[in-house]
Amino acid sequence: ITVTGGEPTLQCDALRALFGAIKADHELRRLTTLVDTNGTLSRQRWQRLLPVLDGAMVDLKAASPGLHERLTGHDNVPVKASIRYLSGKGRLAEVRLLVIAGVTDTDAELGRWADFVSGVDPHVPVRLMAFRHAGTRPVAHQWPETSPEMLERVRDRLETMGLTAVSAG
């Protein structure tokens, strides 16, 4: 069972109750409990969720703090801290990287992504997410949508930088 959003960890107590009920039920406990998150949950809140959480898929919109803030309006320090923490606890299912042509696919940004993820675990699954206009702010409509070919090029570049489990999709 994967809970996604908006941002599901904004309802951390309800999420913990849901996952706890699943784990307590004899028929349902075989199901995995996953969350698709922006990674901004505090360590204290992650600690409360971990006993009933099998894994988290964490979006890292940009490795560069300034670029991440430009894209999301928020610093990426808590996101990176969550990725490190969840990896250390064996609960990091995957890191999701947003690919935007001319914005996050630059050599400098890809190098920062590769350095960060390799520093956490070069074998962590990484999923490249294609940028789409749907649901974005008007300023983002100036960026082109990401093609499958671009995702493949970015995947190849990240693999040459040492990441071993990169998928495009």
Image (tube, rainbow, N blue to C red):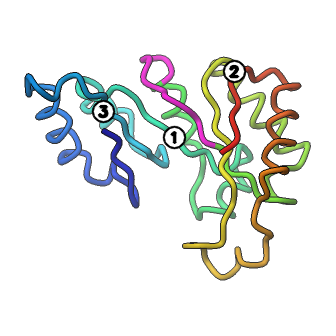
Q: Amino acid at mark 2?
A: Gly
Secondary structure, mark 2, is helix
The answer to whether residue 78 is above or below residue 99 is: above
Looking at the rendered structure, the secondary structure element under dot 3 is loop
The residue at the point 30 percent across, 32 percent down is 33
First-in-chain label (1 vs 2) = 1
Identify the residue position indicated by label 1 in the image: 58
| Crowd around label 1: few <14 · some 14–19 · many ≥20 (10 Å) | many
The residue at which mark 3 appears reads as 33
Q: CA distance from mark 2 to mark 3?
A: 26 Å
Point out the residue furthest to the right here: 107
- Which residue, given by chain and number where applicable, does mark 2 sit on? 119
Image x and y of residue 56, in percent: 43, 34
> In whole angstroms, how far apart are the C-alphas of marks 3 and 1?
14 Å
Query: With respect to residue 168, does 70 lie above or below?
Result: below
The stretch of residues the image draws in magenta is 87-96
Tell whether 77 sits left or right of 32. right
Front residue (pair 151, 106): 151
The N terminus sits in image quarter: top left
Report the front residue among 20 and 69: 20
The answer to whether mark 1 and mark 2 are in CB contact below 8 A is no
Q: Which mark is residue 97?
A: none
Count neighbours of disc 2 (C-alpha within 10 A) and say few if under 14, some if 14 to 19, many if 20 or more: few
User: Where in the figure is residue 128, as x and y percent of width and height?
Assistant: 68, 43
First in residue order: circle 3 vs circle 1:
3
Residue 89 in magenta stretch: yes
